[in-house]
Image: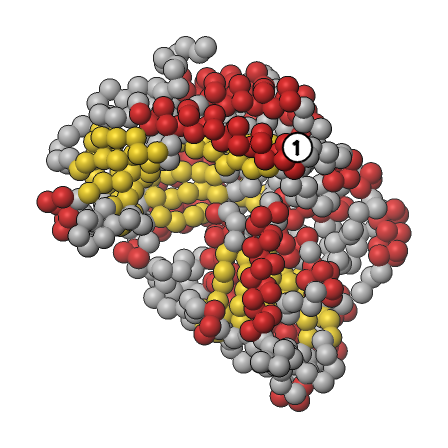
Amino acid sequence: MISRSVWRGLARKGAIPIGGPGLRDFLPSSLADTEPHEALPSASGSQGPLQTEPLRFSLETFGCQMNVSDSEIVTAILCGAGHQYVANAEDADLVLLNTCAVRDTAERKVWTRLQELRSKRRGSDGKKRAAPREAMPRPNLAETSSAAAAKVKVVEPTLLPAKPYVGVLGCMAERLKDELLEEQRLVDLVVGPDAYRDLPRLLDIVQSGYQAMNVQLSLEETYADVPPVRIGMSKNGTQAGARWQADAQLGAFISIMRGCNNMCSFCIVPFTRGRERSRPASSIVDEVRQLQELGIKEITLLGQNVNSYHDKSWSDSLTPYSTSNAGFSNTYRLRDGAGMRFSELLDRCSLAAPDVRFRFTSPHPKDFPPELLDLIAERSNVCKSLHLPLQSGSSSMLDRMRRGYTKEAFMQLVCDARSRIPGVSLSTDTISGFCGETEAEHLDTLEVMRYSRFEFAYMFAYSQRARTRAAHRMADDVPEDTKIRRLQEVIAVHNEGALRSNAEEIGRVLEVLVEGPSRRSTDRSPQFTGRSDHNKRCLFSPGDVAEAIRPGDLIKVKVTQAASPRSLLCEVLPQDLEEGQGHQAQGGYAQGQCR
């Protein structure tokens, strides 16, 4: 294994580390003293499987929809290697946790789960259960490349790891690899989000009594050629590419791009997910058609910056890059040039599957040019809901966050979206108590929240993430009680606006995709739930048509009550009525006008 001192020497000389470049090679020299990525080979460097037994594996997913999509990729790769998926961790030889490192709360959940799994691998006397090393053959490291051997770590010399083996995947794997493997010794396997193809070989190593790790970031990996196994749709968990049964799942995720180039000062994603790269458009459209044939009703296009999609292999497309409006700047300077952009891809996908509803997440507010807003307004099967992550309503705070826009630019985007897309619903993200936040900056955020009247919001107090620009250069100096108080004020303003928005829906007719019984449904008082085109949660009693309504049906309902800031109470209507009934642009904006 290359020592850290040697690594730094190579970096200073401009040499490429063994195993190819990692994200570190593309960061400013000012970050040269941060922890480097290990020098690891790509999956294509594997030397073939070792002679070990197939495993029954379970997979627990934490965090965002992107992790759900990645779990489907992991399932496909492992099933293709002969391993078998099981739904219950109690039945598994291998428990995998696909993790999130964006927020502290997500990491704490994973640490708690790892402690639970460690206790299950210990006997009643508290000692670790394990088998003699002779029970498994040692890997023949002579047949493995030197770089691959560098990531094999020996465990206790006389014992094999006790089952179930435990592996950590995803963002925490990349960020906390040393603590997971060496300090806490909670896991047997650590695999980053760009190294899932290497899982079968790494598991062979684990079964032979070693810890194994691959957290190499990639400039190219998109898994475009890996057909995902969507749990609930596969006939079984033993073969990759097994055909799916559409009655088991209503919606599906399609990952269209990976990584992030924006380098916001608070965000860990560029360090755990690497640089932006986009899947070929043709593979995405093909997957859309396949899902439509399987009866999928709704497809969500996914990416860390989904609307920054840019397939440079599509040389026939020459749409120039433009931001949402003149108040947005592009911190990454290499977005120009030929290639298909997100609005073109969304156009092709929605035309390829006209009976499927389309959503997308998570976007960056800088990449909503007018042509994208107009396409969403015009295309009937593109849902009228947008996610516009605000983070802060203060221009000075947005500058410290390196968001690339001002308060006024964001408010203009909200105005453009409301006026160009009648009936659109908006959601957002906010951070309260970021480094140096003043009371005046907090009040700016409340002002933008009142103006925008977001229908849904993810609101959090700031938690510092290691390796980010904020961790290196800024002080986390807002007291915790102040963070919580400001967060509560943001939540209160949001709830007030969302409830008012829902009240305006009363009397309107909406088309709802039925998802199934609600959490409060009983045999005596059945209640169904579904989402409208503009992403509002609708609750309704099926009444006399209960037997006729099935998950996956598109039905018309009339809104009768604003149950909460997050849901509507509705009644089922005869299905020959027209949708909308005067459904106008919300948020106090007449079409074509702004405040």
Question: Is there any visible trace of residue 317 in the rendered image?
Answer: no
Which residue ends up furthest to the front in the rendered image? 481
- Residue 71 x %, y %: 50, 57
Side of 402 relative to 66 (left or right):
right
- Residue 463 x %, y %: 64, 41
- How many numbered discs sit on the rendered protein? 1
Residue drawn at (38%, 15%) of the image: 588
Side of 543 relative to 468 (left or right):
left
Query: For the residue marked with disc 1, what is the amino acid?
Result: Phe
* Quarter holding residue 595: top left
Residue beneath label 1, please?
Answer: 434
Side of 74 relative to 520 (left or right):
right
Residue drawn at (30%, 19%) of the image: 584
Tell me how the rendering is colored: secondary structure
Question: Is 125 or 81 nearer to us in this picture?
Answer: 125
- Residue 439 x %, y %: 64, 22
Q: Residues within 10 Å of mark 1 (few under 14, many from 20)?
A: many
Question: Is 187 or 229 nearer to us in this picture?
Answer: 187
- Residue 259 x %, y %: 60, 44
Question: Is 70 or 227 nearer to us in this picture?
Answer: 70
Residue drawn at (64%, 67%) of the image: 187
- Could you say whether the residue bearing mark 1 is in a helix, strand or loop? loop
* Quarter holding residue 440: top right
Question: Is 375 or 230 nearer to us in this picture?
Answer: 230
* Quarter holding residue 84: bottom left
Question: Is there any visible trace of residue 441 in the rendered image?
Answer: yes
Side of 203 relative to 555 (left or right):
right
Q: Is residue 562 above or below residue 471?
A: above
Residue drawn at (88%, 46%) of the image: 12
Quadrant where the N terminus sits is bottom right
